[in-house]
Amino acid sequence: MAALRAAELGARTALVTRQRFGGMAANDGAVPVRTLAHAARLIRETRQLGRYGIATVEPILDYPRLLARVREVVEDLQAHSGVRERIDRLGVSIYEHAGVAHFVEPHTIEAENGLRLKGEKFILCAGGMSRRLGVPGFELTVTHSDAWDLTAVPSSMLVIGAGATGVQVASIFASFGSRVQLLQAGPRILPGEDEEVSAAMAAAFRTQGMEVREDFGVIGSFEKAPNGVRMHFSKNGIRGCAEAEIAVVAVGWVADTTGLGLSAAGVETDQRGFVRVNAYQQTSAAHVFAAGDITGQLMLVPQAVNAAFVAATNAVRGATLPLWKQVSPIGSFTDPEFAQVGLTETKAREQHDVVIAKVRFDATPRTIIDGRTNGFCKLIVNRAAREILGCHVVGERAVEITQVAAVAMTAGMPVNELARIPLSFPTYAAILGRAAYVAIRQLGLEGAGHQHELLNSTASEPARTKNGRSE
Ligand SMILES: Cc1cc2nc3c(=O)[nH]c(=O)nc-3n(C[C@H](O)[C@H](O)[C@H](O)COP(=O)(O)OP(=O)(O)OC[C@H]3O[C@@H](n4cnc5c(N)ncnc54)[C@H](O)[C@@H]3O)c2cc1C
């Protein structure tokens, strides 16, 4: 996007990248991981067939065939992306497989393949990488990227780190048949999520047979074991160990500034090592802009693309366009899915007088029809302003449901307006409508959303409690 936008505005533009065009989302992150997650979904769909009277046998996964499908999807998306074509049409010079590029002086970069380019302005979009731990034997561990080199599904797996990446790897491989131990240093998995989401996800994983260990302690080392790798850790002076065929480490994402030679251009990083930018995506060096994971802001593709648009606009036109405030839905394609937008209940209660409306998935028609009754949709509303502050969902189509909430929040739609929309019956989106209706009943508002009372719930009128919460 940065190259496309700069060229669109008339700048003579070069795009230099270490490996293949497309970055991580296309080649190693979102797209391939989603393809694995889709395979996991197909397996669980297949297991449901008997319940609907369709005879079948237990699904058998051919992992090499699945990886071939992943490669097929990656190629197909690249072929149909249109971005490459647009960039080419705009006359951008693309230097793929250039190796690591670095500043040799403020206006000159050199790449490992010998390429040397001078520029008036620069936009850094070098992304991030999995955080490494400085413990003995760390080289025996792997990251999510190593899934592409496996020839078979490992019989057992340690997943260390239960943030978004860790839980996705754990969930996907558990559904492929690996015995998974998910180890989290902190007191709960998914620490960035609403507490009820963390608890529901941990409970769902345990029900599926995954071993989830919160607060497991501090890692001491890794060593080779007869059947894989052993991790040594300690907690309150007591030593423990865990063992599996492979150990996947997903303990955070850091900026990929190694080798960029930032000091030669006068570009500063923050305490976490990310490139520091202002509201115009401009770094401490006025001629260098940055966007995406390298800046450590919300590390997701749509946010990276928006920031790149702003960075390129400002690089060409001067720093005039600030990055706009964005309501960002975030979700993961685990089993069950989970997703959020806005404030968590804890954060909302710190700042506002709120009502909390929760609709359980075992009490709505569509989830019952689909046999997907594990989960809930929780809506957090500012009592006085009727403003939707947050939405948190666990369960089937959670990610899609929060998109609808994000649209309503971006539009500044009060909860009573949301409740009034006759969302299609029976749908997952209508679960959100039902939650809005539950919220307005708590607010004591009349005259909206009665269709939800009739259509989108199987439960009777929700009980109201003192702390502004109803289920
Ligand atoms: C497992 C996983 C799943 C994810 N799933 C999702 C998802 O579902 N949805 C979502 O929105 N986000 C997802 N993300 C996050 C998303 O992939 C990133 O936020 C996004 O790719 C960031 O884009 P970027 O352009 O900043 O960096 P990247 O996509 O990482 O691109 C940076 C590029 O710069 C190159 N590079 C680095 N250093 C240099 C150098 N010195 N010289 C030349 N080239 C260099 C790299 O090789 C790379 O090609 C996921 C991430 C992971 C790890």
Image: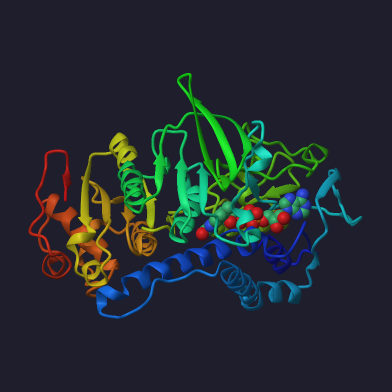
Between residues 392 and 4, which one lies in front from this camera angle?
392
Between residues 161 and 461, which one lies in front from this camera angle?
161
Task: Using the image, determine if residue 257 lies above or below residue 331.
Answer: above
How many numbered marks appear?
0
In the image, what residue occupies the spot 63% across and 36% down?
A: 223
Between residues 8 and 160, which one lies in front from this camera angle?
160
- Residue 11, how many percent across, how many down? 77, 63
Q: Quadrant of residue 56?
A: bottom left
- Residue 431, how many percent across, how many down? 24, 63
Between residues 288 and 111, which one lies in front from this camera angle?
111
Task: Using the image, determine if residue 394 lies above or below residue 195.
Answer: below
Which quadrant, please, contains the N terminus?
bottom right
In the image, what residue occupies the spot 55% across and 55% down?
A: 154
Give the side of residue 233 with respect to residue 427, left or right.
right
Q: Residue furthest bottom?
A: 54
In the image, what residue occupies the spot 26% across and 52% down?
A: 378
